[in-house]
């Protein structure tokens, strides 16, 4: 009688490797949450014992009403009108403080919109002349790619808290 | 003349490199994945300017109904009462000096709630905060 000898294969079975790997990929893809990882930076002033007193007349006051309406220096204004209003004032005095003062019931999103708009204002100095412009798309692109670019810190924006207003204002 | 039988191609798809590709993808996902420390769902405000937030940050999330959740960036976020935000921020400042705090607040939340948090952060001497936002879209 003839016996059939079975020889064991000398290959490592790797056919299921891809299946396992793809299962792991699916797991990582499902558990990965595409987190929002960008935002507006906001440097808080150092808690100064003697903060500089800013007279209301020296600054531009942007108030945000509960309805979202903007009142700039007692005048009702749309968001896109603020730049034209600020331009001559900042050309006269680039260090002019701009104060954002939202009403307690005003939506937070409106404050961020105003803050964002002010941050996109750029001051260019050509010799003695001061030019107020808004940042371009390419500036935004560059700043998004390069964290060392300090964009939007040209104008003096202040957002006092209610406690500071109660303590130091008037 | 008898023609020689043609050499037939095997009907097998070569899948040996499939695992290599798949493992490369896995390595990519493992390196890029960031486990979110805070999963609070909020409708973020939209801004044109958006800067990359560093990886090691503390979070304070504020929902539309005024619920505050916070994390120092090391553990998952937990609810904190509004009056405890200052002690949370002081802890972060003393344990991790220079660590920014990210404010993840809902765009419709009344500003007074944000104001209280900002005031607590100022009192705790936090130097830098980020206002988390989404990219502004063209459909205005």
Image: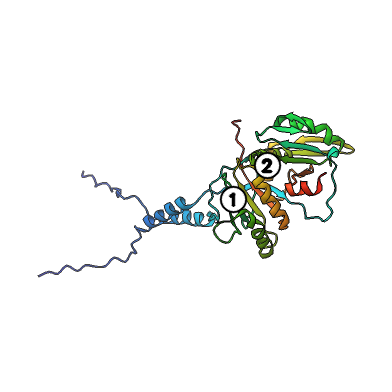
Vertical comparison of B95 with B12: above or below: below
Q: Quadrant of the N terminus of chain B?
A: top left
Residue B138 placed where, x, y %? Answer: 61, 32
The picture quadrant where one finds residue B107 is top right
Q: Count residues near mark 2 (Cα–Cα under 10 Å), then give few for <14, some for 14-19, many for 20+.
A: some
Q: Residue furthest right?
A: A128
Asked whether residue A161 appears in the rendered view, the answer is: no
The residue under label 2 is A104
The picture quadrant where one finds residue A73 is top right
Q: Secondary structure at mark 2?
A: loop
In front of the other: label 1 or label 2?
2
Q: Which of the two residues, B63 or A36, is positioned nearer the viewer here?
A: B63
Residue B3 lies left or right of residue A154; in this view the side is left
Vertical comparison of B18 with B139: above or below: below
Vertical comparison of A111 with B52: above or below: above
Q: What distance separates the C-alpha of mark 1 from that of mark 2? A: 19 Å
Q: Quadrant of the C terminus of chain B?
A: top right
Q: Which of the two residues, A84 or B9, is positioned nearer the viewer here?
A: A84
Mark linked to residue B61 = 1
The subunit carrying tag 1 is: B
Residue drawn at the location 66% of the way across and 34% of the way down: A68
Residue drawn at the location 66% of the way across and 65% of the way down: B95
Residue A47 lies left or right of residue B137; in this view the side is right
Asked whether residue A83 appears in the rendered view, the answer is: yes
Vertical comparison of B90 with A119: above or below: below
Residue A21 lies left or right of residue B129; in this view the side is left
Q: Count residues near mark 1 (Cα–Cα under 10 Å), then give few for <14, some for 14-19, many for 20+.
A: many
Residue drawn at the location 41% of the way across and 56% of the way down: A21
Q: Secondary structure at mark 1?
A: strand
């Amino acid at each position: 009688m003839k016996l059939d000898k079975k020889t064991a294969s000398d290959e490592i079975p790797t056919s299921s490797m891809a299946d396992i790997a793809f299962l792991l990929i699916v797991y990582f893809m499902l558990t990965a949450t595409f987190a929002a990882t960008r935002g507006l930076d906001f440097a808080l002033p150092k808690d100064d014992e003697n903060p500089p007193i800013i007279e209301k007349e020296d600054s531009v006051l942007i108030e945000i009403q509960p309805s979202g309406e903007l009142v700039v220096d007692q005048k009702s204004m749309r968001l896109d009108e603020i730049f034209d209003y600020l331009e001559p004032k900042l050309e006269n005095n680039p260090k002019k403080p701009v104060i954002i003062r939202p009403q307690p019931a005003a939506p937070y999103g409106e404050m961020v919109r105003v803050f964002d708009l002010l941050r996109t204002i750029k001051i260019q100095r050509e010799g003695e002349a001061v030019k107020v412009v808004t940042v371009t798309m390419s500036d935004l692109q560059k700043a998004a790619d390069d964290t060392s670019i300090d964009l939007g810190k040209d104008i003096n924006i202040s957002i006092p808290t209610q406690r500071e207003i109660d303590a130091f204002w008037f | 003349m008898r023609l020689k039988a043609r050499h037939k191609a095997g009907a097998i798809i070569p899948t040996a490199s499939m695992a290599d590709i798949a493992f490369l993808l896995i390595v990519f996902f493992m390196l890029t994945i960031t486990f979110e420390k805070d999963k609070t769902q909020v409708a973020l405000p939209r801004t044109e300017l958006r800067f990359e937030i560093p990886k090691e940050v503390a979070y304070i999330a504020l929902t539309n109904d005024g619920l505050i959740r916070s994390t120092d960036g090391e553990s998952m976020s937990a609810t904190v009462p509004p009056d405890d935000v200052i002690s949370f921020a002081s802890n972060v400042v003393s344990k991790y000096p220079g660590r920014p705090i990210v404010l993840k607040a809902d765009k419709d939340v009344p500003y007074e709630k944000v104001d209280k948090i900002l005031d607590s952060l100022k009192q705790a001497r936090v130097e830098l905060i980020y206002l988390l936002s989404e990219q502004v879209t063209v459909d205005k």
